[in-house]
Amino acid sequence: MRLDADTMKPIYLQIAEWLETQILSGKIACDEKVFSQYQLAEMFNINPATAAKGLSILADKGILYKKRGLGMFASPDAKAQILDQRKGEKLKHLVLELVLEAGRLGIAEAELTEMMRQANEELKGEVQS
Amino acid sequence: MKAIECIGLNKVYGENVAVDSLSLVVEHNKMTGIIGPNGAGKTTLLKLIAGFLKATAGEMRVFGEAPFNNLRVSANAIFIDDRMVFPSSLCLDDICRMAARVYANWDHKLARGLLDYFALNPKLCHAHLSRGQKSTVNAILGLAAHCPLTIFDEPTLGMDVGVRRDFYRALLKDYMQHPRSILFSSHMLLEVEDILEDIVLLKDGYKVLHLPLPQLTEYAVGLAGNSDALCALTENREVLHTRQISSCFSYVVIKNDLKRGDLQQAQLSGVDITAVPAADLCVYLTEQRKGGIDDVFSQTKSVANR
């Protein structure tokens, strides 16, 4: 397996994201054991300490939990957590883009919020009709 | 446990200060990269650690003992580079047998397996091998010796890209099966960074930094955009590298201490923020030359135009 050398993301983050995607796609079920740092090191050709850092990020977020002497396991709500977090990131990014573009077009904040309110209403109207 | 500890280490050759008041602690069982440009003092430092050289001043301990003239350190360390010399009467098989007598943890199966994999006939004489093949044999000796302190000084010189790739993987697998302290010097950080845990960056004989690799990848950020906007952003900050891309567009690398507000300011003024690959960062941190290679050409060009 190869990591994407072109992306600027640190490898341990790529490992964490790869594990998240495995959980999202159901390849790793909740309460199932995930790969060990040595398995990840072997799979991606990276130092086991780097792989461990990827795992510990997910443990800190509560997506994985540790069983003493047995390894890391996917939390019961891992999938929901990852979904939430990815939604949050995506939306935040879109909003930022929106605000930036509005700035470039010289649209004031009040006008922008009004536009969002209108768009929301139009959508509601479409649903009702 | 500390594998290596040096305090205020100095090594002077005549006028040349090769290692300059260097202090360093390497914990046992880590894979550490010793990185730096030509003449940074990588080889001298590694030879001091191996006990091949005597320090001019300062303290050096390997597994708690001074390595120079020390049998215990010699028995527990192996130093691999491309200048290893073996008696011409010995074939590769003989060399392996000798190594088995010297190194307590020698893994004969691994040595023979790797020689076989790299199509190196054990009946061949070391002196008759090509440069890349010699490096490969030396690297195999370094792996199979399973020494508690294994030092590779530019082990991949002359190896072709396929052999290098296989060697890095062999090193990683063997390290995981037999954890030990490994020092690895290279000027090709890009190739080896993934398998390293820590990096020691040297310049002019002193230590620029000693960091875990993930921290090194987040040490700096690159900003690309309008020169004026960049000036405003980089004011009062440590600039590690600057490159003028066009008359009003530049690329600047600064230490990664941007706050949230700075990031927004950057985005608002149309400045792109990018991560700086570890290999590039090491080049920027050890740059000797003022400006860039482009400046040489722009100068010669202006002379020619006259």
Image (tube, rainbow, N blue to C red):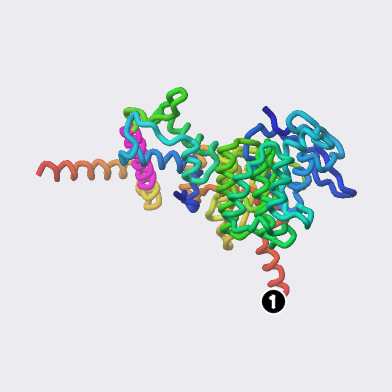
- From the viewer's side, name the closer residue of B217 and B112: B112
Q: Examine the residues drawn in magenta and state their main secondary structure.
A: helix
Q: Give the residue furthest to the left.
A: A129
Residue B184 versus residue B40: which sits nearer the camera? B184
Disc 1 residue crowd, few under 14, some 14–19, many 20+, Cα 10 Å = few
> In x, y percent, where is residue B116?
59, 54
User: Is residue B8 in view from this perspective?
Assistant: no
- The quadrant where residue A122 appears: top left
Q: Position of residue B49 (x, y in %)?
A: 76, 39
Query: Is A92 part of what is drawn in magenta?
Result: yes
Which residue is painted at 68% across and 63% down in the image?
A: B295
Q: Residue at x 59, y 40 (%)?
A: B175
Foreground pick, A119 / B130: B130
Residue B227 in the image: x percent, y percent? Answer: 57, 55
Is residue B278 shown to the viewer in this render? yes
Q: Callout 1, which amino acid?
A: Asn
Q: Would residue B74 appear left or right of B266 to someone viewing this image?
A: right
In the rendered image, the residue lying farthest to the right is B14
Quadrant of the snapshot with the C terminus of chain B: bottom right
Q: Chain of mark 1?
A: B
Residue marked by disc 1: B305
Label 1 residue SS: helix
Residue B53 is drawn in which quadrant?
top right
- Chain part drawn in magenta: A79-99
Q: Quadrant of residue A33?
A: top left
Q: Position of residue B67 (x, y in %)?
A: 80, 35
